[in-house]
Image: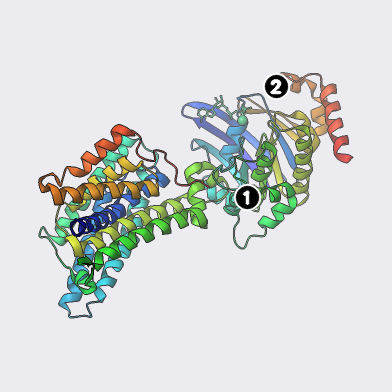
Amino acid sequence: MLSVRDLHSYYGKSHIVQGVDLDIGAGEIVSLLGRNGAGKTTTLKSLVGLVSGSEGRVELDGRRIDGNRTCAIARQGVVLVPEHRGIFAELTVEENLAIAERRGSGRTRSAVYDLFPRLAERRCNRGDAISGGEQQMLAIGRAVLCSPKVLLLDEPTEGLAPVIVDELIRIVRGLAQEGIAVLVVEQNIRFCEAVASRHYILSQGKIVFEGTSDEFGRASDARETYLALGSPGKSAGDAQTIRQGINQ
Amino acid sequence: MSSAFIPLLLDSLASAALIFFAAVGLTLVFSVLKVLNVAHGSLYSIGGYLAASLSLFVASRGLNPYFSFVALLLSAALVAAVLGPLLEATLIRWVCGKSEAVQILATFGLFLILEDLQRIIFGVQSYYEDTPMRLMGTTTLGGVVYLNYQLVLIGVALAVIFGLRFLIRHTRLGRLMAAVVADREMAQSIGINTDRIFLLAFSLGVFLAALGGALSTPTSGIAPGLGADTMVLAFAVAAIGGLGQIEGAALASLIVGVARVTAVYVAPEFDAVAPYAAMLVVLLVRPYGLLGTMKIRKV
Ligand SMILES: Nc1ncnc2c1ncn2[C@@H]1O[C@H](COP(=O)(O)OP(=O)(O)OP(=O)(O)O)[C@@H](O)[C@H]1O
Ligand SMILES: [Mg+2]
């Protein structure tokens, strides 16, 4: 569905993303991991045309989208939910959704309220008068209204309580089941292991690991070198706990 | 006393209404596009020239004089429809996001070009065509004679204030503008065509300026230099009201209008400096203007 070849991005003279290749299929959830400053956010922003100094080939269903304007890319179906959620503080929850809604597109506000009942209760609240978890749901709901084929989530669990993280896991899985491809950038490795079936590790702008969850689980060297995690066993155990939590 | 006071009040309000048309567009464009358009006053005078020319044409053809009202509105709409998109898609889009110095220099260049174009097209003579004002006649109430046209000017200005408030708070376009103002990249990321919003907001600003110019012709006529005079008044209003608020622009226009007309009545030699005296006093008390923040909307 989304294929990225030889992506390079620059901020002025600094070469941040250095030849990244990525592939994400329909309904697939893929994680992009890496240390602070590795270039994960820059990669996501480049995919939607928000980094002016970027080059490379980005294809959506075989059609090139690199070079298009950001709003055109969003309408073609690649939608970014940014790191700090980008909720419009002065608009209400309802208005935040309304501005993303497009006549004639399949997704409607009421479908979003069905997906996130808590947002329906908050629909008249200002964007800055709802909790962090609700803001994240609003950000995802707003992106869903754009009828995405590919969702790019930048640190969706940042600062959220574990129960909310569990709810996000359920929602992201649900979206993937509808055929949406999801690329998720996360520091929260447990969240990634719970939702994603494949993982990429980015280090200093280059992909240094790519593999399925099993391969990722076994690649303790890569995890220690590039992610500086504790013992793999512990983290796998945490992922297990999360899975159990969801199954209950 | 009251027979002298009421005309002064009415003249002040009518003058404030015209100043408001010029200033509110400047404010709107600044708050949405973050561009300070020094050429904004020229759009007011172009609207005035076009309205005067069309009205004279209506009169010279012996058409129904009520067509001169149509001429006023039509000229404002024409200026907005032609110059709005043309300027926004070229110079204004280019200066968007550039430093303030670049914006001021570039739009000052545009001002010079527009002023010369007006001299080439409309000549250097002044235009005076007051058919709309004469058609409306006067009302005598309690021994005081009111020009009905002035009452209409005040009414139209009030309608613009409430219309803009409604647009910003209760329409989809208003929400889109608020989103684009708050976070341009985020707005684009959810598929909002920010260029289209900028074009609409800029054209609306042009329309309001041109409408002010058109409405001013029956009362004050048009002469070379109007663009510059208007610009300076609009900046005084922006400084007093704080750039970026419709209510602020309205209040500041009122202050400038009152200052100016009072000077005309009391000490005509201070007519030209009165608006700046008012500006100075306000800024000494409130350095960021009366309402002081740069927000186009609060829920
Ligand atoms: N707007 C910018 N201008 C210049 N340099 C930038 C800009 N944004 C990011 N950088 C630099 O690019 C590098 C990569 O940043 P990026 O935000 O992509 O990292 P990240 O992997 O998302 O990190 P984090 O985990 O902290 O979010 C960093 O060294 C950062 O300092
Ligand atoms: Mg980041």
- Quarter of the image where one finds residue A166: top right
Chain-order first, disc 1 or disc 2: 1
Q: Which mark is residue A4?
A: none
- Residue bearing the label numbered 2: A226
Q: CA distance from mark 1 to mark 2?
A: 44 Å
Q: Which class describes the residues within 10 Å of circle 2: few (<14), some (14-19), or many (20+)?
A: some
- Residue bearing the label numbered 1: A124
Comparing marks 1 and 2, which lies closer to the viewer?
A: 1
Instruction: Say left or right for A105 vs B162.
Output: right
Q: Is residue B94 above or below residue B67?
A: above
Query: Ligand 1 falls in which quarter?
Result: top right
Whether residue B215 appears in this view of the structure is: yes
Where residue A129 appears, as percent x and y from the top left, is: 62, 40
Q: Which class describes the residues within 10 Å of circle 1: few (<14), some (14-19), or many (20+)?
A: some
Q: Chain of mark 1?
A: A
Q: Nearer the viewer, residue A136 or A222?
A: A136
Mark 2 residue CB less than 8 A from any atom of ligand 1: no
Q: What amino acid type is highlighted by mark number 2?
A: Tyr
Question: Looking at the picture, do discs 1 and 2 lie on one chain?
Answer: yes
Whether residue A64 appears in this view of the structure is: no
Where residue B69 appears, as percent x and y from the top left, is: 27, 71
Where residue B53 appears, as percent x and y from the top left, is: 19, 67
Report the residue at 81% width, 33% height from top.
A213
Q: Is residue B168 above or below residue B286?
A: below
Callout 2: SS: helix
Callout 1: SS: loop
Check if mark 1's residue and mark 2's residue have beta carbons within 8 Å. no
Instruction: Say left or right for B68 vs A21.
Output: left
Q: What amino acid type is highlighted by mark number 1?
A: Cys
Q: Nearer the viewer, residue A121 or B48?
A: A121
Where residue A173 appears, as percent x and y from the top left, is: 78, 44
Q: Nearer the viewer, residue B61 or B106?
A: B61
